Amino acid sequence: MSKKDLNIVLLQSDIFWEDAEKNLAHFSSLVDDIREPVDLVVLPEMFSTGFTVNTGKCAETMNGPSMHFLKETAGKRNCMVVGSLLIGEETVFYNRLVCMSPDGTFRTYNKRHLFRLSEEYKVVRAGDKKIIVQKGDWHFLPLVCYDLRFPVWSKNTYRNGKHEYDFLVYPSNWPQSRSYVWRSLLIARAMENQSYVIGVNRIGTDGYGIRYSGNSMVVDPKGIIVAEAGDKEEILQATLSMEELNLYRESTKFGLDWDRFTIET
């Protein structure tokens, strides 16, 4: 294994409905069950509550228990930890993804596309900026769940001989009823961007009665699924190969023909 390879873990689990204390304890136990060294751990969307718009009960501050959990976990495992949570800032709420580093520093992304089949788009403010996060030799674009449906927002770029990012990350609460769409879009995002794609979903049934079938997965730049969970709780491990990624990009050079455009937000 090359030193540039990235060892990742996807934590697929049921989520106790709107109960941060139980969820943080449960995900902490899952982290303790990871036996191998890991560079990146990815949690589902709103990992501490499940996908909810109950801001009064569930919104936390950036100094709340879920942020403390992310910081403690990243430090203890000496890895980056990624997940989203419901954040309140005065009277404004965000579905905020956090990329926490082992030294306690972090970067954030506010979910851009808010789900219209729920009340999310009415009570949560949409983000308008993407971030590119560096982890070792790798660069990645973190997005959240419904963002998966919007290829322009996730589009990779190729300029001056370099791709903007090497993999996409989607923490999600993606319903079982649209599992075919989940699989299809993750594969499509990998192929069109010549990047790895990581999709982390939950299982179980939430407080709205919506069922989730998991199917967390890692897809390679060719669109091949290299690791996939079923519909049970699972610690899914995979290794991303920089050598294989670069070889594929060099052999195809699709980036030279990508369209250039700007996005209005």
Image: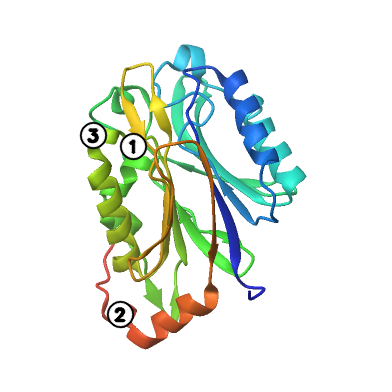
- Is residue 222 toward the left or the right of residue 35 in the image? left
Dot label at residue 174: 1
Looking at the image, tell me whether mark 1 or mark 2 is earlier in sequence order: 1
Q: Quadrant of residue 114?
A: top left
Above or below, 195 against 247 in this view is above
The image shows residue 199 at horizontal and vertical percentages of: 41, 49
Q: Quadrant of residue 5?
A: bottom right
Considering the numbered disc 3 on the image, is that residue within a helix, a strand or a loop? helix
Where is residue 44 drawn, in percent x and y? 47, 38
User: Where residue 2 sits: x, y (%)?
Assistant: 63, 76
Looking at the rendered image, the disc whose residue lies closer to the viewer, 1 or 3, is 3
Q: Could you classify mark 3 by the number of other residues whose Cα lies within 10 Å: few (under 14), some (14-19), or many (20 or more)?
A: few
Q: Which residue is mark 3?
A: 177
Query: Neighbour class for label 1 at 10 Å: few (<14), some, many (≥20)?
Result: many
Q: Nearer the viewer, residue 133 or 37?
A: 37
Q: Amino acid at mark 3?
A: Ser
Q: Amino acid at mark 2?
A: Phe
Is 57 left, or right, of 206 in this rendering? right
Which numbered disc, 3 or 2, marks the residue that appears first in the sequence? Answer: 3
Question: What amino acid type is highlighted by mark number 1?
Answer: Trp
The residue depicted at 57 percent of the width and 25 percent of the height is 23
- Nearest the eye: 40 or 153: 40
Q: Which residue is mark 2?
A: 254
